[in-house]
Image (spheres, grey):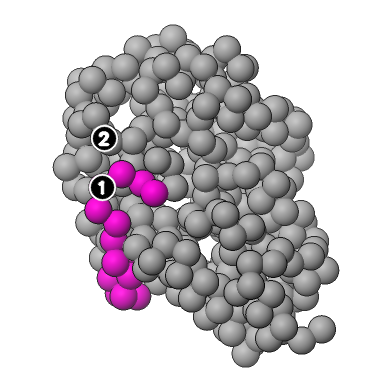
Amino acid sequence: MFIDDLFSKSWDTENLSSQELLFLLSHPPDSIESLKTIAEAGAISRKRVSGKAEVHGQLALDLAPCACDCKFCSFARVNNIFKDESRISPEESVFYARQHEKNGANAVYVMTTAQYPFGQFIEVSQEIRKNLNPETLMVANVGDQSLERARRIKDAGYSGVYHARRMREGTDTLIPPEKRLESIRNFQEAGLKVGTCVEPVGPEHTDEEIVQAILFAASVNPAFSGAARRIEIPGTEIASRGMISELRMAQIVAVTILGTPASVKGFCTHEPCTLGTLAGANLFWAETGSNPRDIEEKTEQGRGLGVHECKAVYRECEWDILQGPSAYLS
């Protein structure tokens, strides 16, 4: 198998097979083959979006111990990081959403934990929608939903949803993997675009697992795909497994791009980094409020970056920034 032949296939918009993707992932992250993969995927990504990256802003409506017990999440009840529930007011929600809009975010995400009351989520969302410019796109980052609830999310003013079947879903979480796919289908049937990601990747995940996750994400016809590494939550059981490097994450982002149909133009990574942009990640998130990868109650005082900081990372790699609503979710 010749690596340059695989790049030629990708430039010709041919889909790579699982064996070809495994071959690309099998090289050490610092090898010439991996660095070439990063360069080729980065060039393909820039071409697909005419060199214009996006920054989306996310605000969290609540912070609470969550019974889904995703081991990689700081909200998980089993991790015992956050012991009390708190919710921001509708007025605070509007303030944070408008702040992201004012700073030039290409979309505004509203995130909740899985147990946040659905009716309250709809009410707060409607209030946010009323106070944003009509052209500003809203995206929901919520738990699994029925078709009826998905339609209510659409009616509340959302254009899309972020939803992923995470690595080792059902093993490192209490969420059945099939439930994630069912929700994705419900969102799409309701008229919502679905963005997804291969995440959260840790050093224990095999190349075969990663390839299956890449192909699953590609199979749902996403608005965007991508890859993100697992962030260590201090004091948790899963932290002992360690973290992959940013270079390994960049390699996985690159292979994700090469393993996703050319119809998908958006590719995310998290957290924002220059290596990710070199590999072709053309979507970052700015964050306010709680964050499942942070132990600070307000991630803007911890790991979270703002819109302007995310844009600065892109400029370091000579990306332009899209002005106006997201091209992936419009």
Q: Is residue 224 left or right of residue 329?
A: right
Spot the residue most to the top: 119
The residue carrying pointer 1 sits among few (fewer than 14), some (14 to 19) or many (20 or more) residues within 10 Å by Cα, namely: some
Q: At x 51% / y 36%, what residue is drawn?
A: 193
Tell which of 98 and 241 is nearer to you: 98
Marked residue nearer the N-terminal end (2 or 1): 2
Separation of residues labelled 2 and 1 (CA atoms): 8 Å
The percent coordinates of residue 12 (x first, y second) are 63, 72
The percent coordinates of residue 279 (x first, y second) are 51, 72
The residue carrying pointer 2 sits among few (fewer than 14), some (14 to 19) or many (20 or more) residues within 10 Å by Cα, namely: few
Q: At x 22% / y 40%, what residue is drawn?
A: 101
Q: At x 36% / y 60%, what residue is drawn?
A: 53
* The N terminus - image quarter: bottom right
Q: At x 66% / y 42%, what residue is drawn?
A: 220
Which residue is labeled 1 in the image? 324
Tell which of 264 and 28 is nearer to you: 264
Amino acid type of the residue that numbered disc 2 sits on in the rendered structure: Glu
Is 323 inside the magenta-drawn segment?
A: yes
Magenta residue span:
313-327
The percent coordinates of residue 270 (x first, y second) are 47, 56
Which residue is labeled 2 in the image? 135
Amino acid type of the residue that numbered disc 1 sits on in the rendered structure: Gly
The percent coordinates of residue 98 (x first, y second) are 20, 34
Contact, mark 2 vs mark 1 (Cβ under 8 Å): yes
Q: Is label 2 in a helix, a strand or a loop?
A: loop
> Which labelled disc corresponds to residue 280?
none
Residue 111 visible? The answer is no
Where residue 86 sits, quadrant-wise, is top left
Chief secondary structure of the magenta portion:
loop
Q: Is residue 78 above or below residue 280?
A: above
Q: Is residue 265 left or right of residue 164?
A: left
Is 118 inside the magenta-drawn segment?
A: no
